[in-house]
Amino acid sequence: MKNKKVLFLSQAAMIAALYVVLTFVANAFGLASGAIQVRLSEMLAILPFFTPAAIPGLYIGCMLSNLLTGGCLLDIVIGSLASLIGAVGAYLVRKKKWLVPLPTILANAVIVPFVLIYGYGLVDAWWYLVLTVGAGEVISCGVLGMILLLALQKNAARIFKTA
């Protein structure tokens, strides 16, 4: 029983750390925030397909990333909540592999525009931001995430083993 808890916490922590590192890489190229964003870290949003430890890992990773990249309070709280909603949704649809990125894409495309408008004062129309954030999510989570899912699937039993 204790080994399962340690494994769960270790996997969640590793996913959170990877999320932060990949966000910093995207941030170095100006892609981690703003109206047009392609967070490389969002490709990890498919990990609930393999392990429920990805849910807290993605949430904490997003929260730390938003905090460490200078995000506003609304982004730290609500933006991270969008990732949590997406991760839970991905876990719930994990039986249908091709649907796994969809909850994250939708949660971020709908919620993040409100953060951009009310947290950062972007004057763009909400629908425009839905399209730009959604497009970035399709690239990072839909395309790169599915490539990652397919690559990890072959060795998933070894990578995401249970205690």
Image (tube, helix red, strand yellow):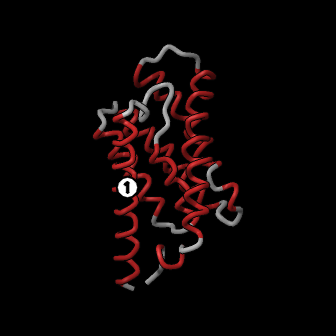
Viewer-proximal residue among 72 and 94: 94
Instruction: Give amino acid for label 1.
Output: Leu
* Mark 1 burial class by Cα count in 10 Å: few <14, some 14-19, many 20+: some
- Say how many tags the image has: 1
Position of residue 57 measured from the top left corner of the image (x, y, whole percent): 41, 58
Q: Is residue 16 left or right of residue 50?
A: left
* Residue at 34% across, 30% down: 72
Q: Nearer the viewer, residue 93 or 73?
A: 93
Residue 115 horizontal side relative to residue 151, left or right = left
Q: Secondary structure at mark 1?
A: helix
In this rendering, the answer to whether 145 lies above or below 35 is below
- Using residue 3 as the reference point, say whether residue 36 is left or right of it: right
Kindly indicate the quadrant of the structure image that contains residue 106.
Answer: top right
Check disc 1 and report the residue beneath it: 18
Between residue 19 and residue 64, name the one nearer to us: 19
Residue 111 vertical placement versus 15 (above, below): above
In the image, taking residue 101 as reference, residue 58 lies left or right, namely: left
Tell me what residue is drawn at x 49 percent, y 50 percent: 84
Q: Residue at x 32, y 46 (%)?
A: 64
At 47% from the left and 74% from the top, the residue drawn is 159
The part of the image, by quadrant, that contains residue 32 is: top left
Instruction: Point out the image quarter for the C terminus.
Output: bottom left
Q: Quadrant of the N terminus?
A: bottom left
Task: Single out the residue that lies furthest toward the top.
Answer: 123
Q: Position of residue 35 (x, y in %)?
A: 50, 25
Q: Position of residue 143 (x, y in %)?
A: 61, 47
